[in-house]
Image: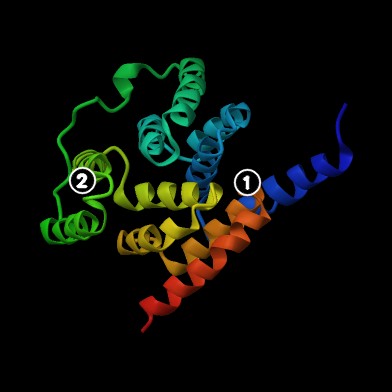
Amino acid sequence: MSIPAFEHYTNELLLGDVWQRPGLSPRDRGIVTVATLIARNQSQELPFYLNLAMDNGVKPGEVAEVITHLAFYSGWPNASAAARVAQTVFAERDISTEQLPAAKVPLLPLDQATEAARASMVEQNFGQVAPGVVKYTTEALFRDLWLRPGLAPRDRSMVTVSALVASGQVAQITYHLNRAMDNGLSEAEAGEMLTQLAFYAGWPHVFSAMPVFKDVFAKRKE
């Protein structure tokens, strides 16, 4: 049995209007949506949106990197659930493991000065609180995961910001939104991400995030 109003909004408003808006490419909308579903552990919806994302130009290897990236930003259980769904979708599309990025790959160049400043700040603030977290933040995240070439830095940032908004982690948005814009995400694209996220993460999460986005936009213009 269908629910007429929900079906109407899904087909006419969401897929027929929001997904067609020019402010964010269909490919980017696919990445934002998949990241949101993984962050919220809503794997039942993933098969449709993984296929839609790949139909809109997201490569299988990029899907694999999105899942890997979100293991760190949304937790291993969420990524594990998403990986199981992706394996089924890949099999249906005749995508083999050999077509996905290897576990160990040559990394992108590290911005030594920026990373040194970030690591120093985290060490000074939290080195005595949770040295293990500080260690893996540097070694696993910023000097390994973020440098994997299978997903462009802009896209990794877009995935991260989407996951933060979708899970209500407002305190972390400022740093990662600035990083996203440093990595090439425009202000207009960031704003349009919020439109996409409103439908997939809910209006309350987006309205909680909007003041942070507004503040970041304003300070980058000063």
Q: Residues within 10 Å of mark 1 (few under 14, many from 20)?
A: some
Q: Position of residue 13 (x, y in %)?
A: 74, 51
Q: Which one is nearer the viewer's eye here, 73 or 55?
A: 73
Percent of width and height locating residue 149 = 24, 40
Q: Is residue 114 left or right of residue 89?
A: left
The amino acid type found where label 1 is placed reads Tyr
Q: Nearer the viewer, residue 69 or 50?
A: 69
Q: Give the numbered dot on residue 200.
A: 1
Query: Quick one: quadrant of the N terminus?
Result: top right
Which residue lies most toward the left here?
112
- Residue 191, relative to residue 37: is it above or below? below
Is 69 placed left or right of 116 in the picture?
A: right
Task: Say what amino acid the circle numbered 2 marks.
Answer: Thr
User: Which residue is painted at 22% across and 50% down in the image?
Assistant: 128
Q: Position of residue 125 (x, y in %)?
A: 25, 58
The residue that mark 2 highlights is: 138
Rendering quarter of residue 218: bottom left
Query: Could you say where residue 55 lies in the image, as x and y percent from the top left?
Result: 52, 35
Tell me how the rendering is colored. rainbow
Q: Tell me the quarter of the picture where residue 40 sits.
A: top right
Q: For the view shown, which residue lies furthest in the bottom direction?
A: 222
Q: Are the residues flagged by discs 2 and 1 in contact, CB closer than 8 Å? A: no
| Residue at 60% in and 55% down | 205
